């Protein structure tokens, strides 16, 4: 897919370089960048992706998305540079476009709240499976589609990982997906490119008054 096609999801993006480069993947971790990757620099709680542009370029990245002023960054040529106001939002939208918006092709159930997310997600999955549907499950305990499990570290995956996972579930023939949606994932744009058919709010307690 050409970079220009992906950037149709990001109106107002400032581009320096060619938009005709072919993009083979969307990554936020320089260690997983491969030839043709679009590397999106996001600021984490411990690391800032802007510090790893050279590493991503060394692994073959074809273009980079940044929030910071490119003139203040060390960007190896001939990388195409795309500047956006919010790279986390851009990551979600770009990944959604790259994977052909998988949530639009699944019946999506999003479950949020302080307590009960895991139980509710598993109940929803069990009910739908009993009704004869193949359903994906994403949550604290595991990510699963039918009998196939996927590795995961968070209740709700980072947006590019989430879109990749939903695309795999779609390609496996899933009818829908039940997923836990953490407060962090909402605040950090991880589910921005997800289109939910059903939203479930369990409760709100003092544990989430600060986030």
Image (cartoon, rainbow, N blue to C red):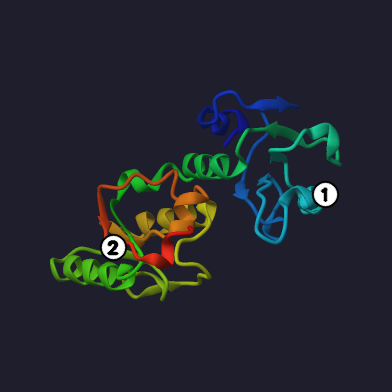
Among numbered discs 2 and 1, the one appearing first in the sequence: 1
Res 45 → quadrant: bottom right
Looking at the figure, which quarter contains the N terminus?
top right
Kindly report the distance in space between the C-alpha atoms of the residues bearing marks 2 and 1. Answer: 44 Å
Mark 1 = which residue? 54
Q: Position of residue 67 (x, y in %)?
A: 69, 38
- Percent across and percent down for residue 156 are 45, 61
Q: Residues within 10 Å of mark 1 (few under 14, many from 20)?
A: some
Q: Where is 21 relative to 175, above or below?
A: above
What residue appears at the point 78 percent right and 52 percent down from the top-left corner? 52
Picture quadrant where residue 120 is located: bottom left
Residue 203 is marked as: 2
Residue under the image location 22 percent in, 71 percent down? 123
Residue 83 in the image: above or below residue 54: above
How many callouts does the rendering have? Answer: 2
Can residue 87 be seen from the camera position used here? yes
Mark seen at residue 199? none
Whether residue 174 appears in this view of the structure is: no
* Above or below: residue 66 compared with residue 165: above
Relative to 81, residue 182 above or below: below
Query: Percent position (x, y) of residue 127?
Result: 17, 69
Going by the image, does 8 lie left or right of 28? left
């Amino acid at each position: 897919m050409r970079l220009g096609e992906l950037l149709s999801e990001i109106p107002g993006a400032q581009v320096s370089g060619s938009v005709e480069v072919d993009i083979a993947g969307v990554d936020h971790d320089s260690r997983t960048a491969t030839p043709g990757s679009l590397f999106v620099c996001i600021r984490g709680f411990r690391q800032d992706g802007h510090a790893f542009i050279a590493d991503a370029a060394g692994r073959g990245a074809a273009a980079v998305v940044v929030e910071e002023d490119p003139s203040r960054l060390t960007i190896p040529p001939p990388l195409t540079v795309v500047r956006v106001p919010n790279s986390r939002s851009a990551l979600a939208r770009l990944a959604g476009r790259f994977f052909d918006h998988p949530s639009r092709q699944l019946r999506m159930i999003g479950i949020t709240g302080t307590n009960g997310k895991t139980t509710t997600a598993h109940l929803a999955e069990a009910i739908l499976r009993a009704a004869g549907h193949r359903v994906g499950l994403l949550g604290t305990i595991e990510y699963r589609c039918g009998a196939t499990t996927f590795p995961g570290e968070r209740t709700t995956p980072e947006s590019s990982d989430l879109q990749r996972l939903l695309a795999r579930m779609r390609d496996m023939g899933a009818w829908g997906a039940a997923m836990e949606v953490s407060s962090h994932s909402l605040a950090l744009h991880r589910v921005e490119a997800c289109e939910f058919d059903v939203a479930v709010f369990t409760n709100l307690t003092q544990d989430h008054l600060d986030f």
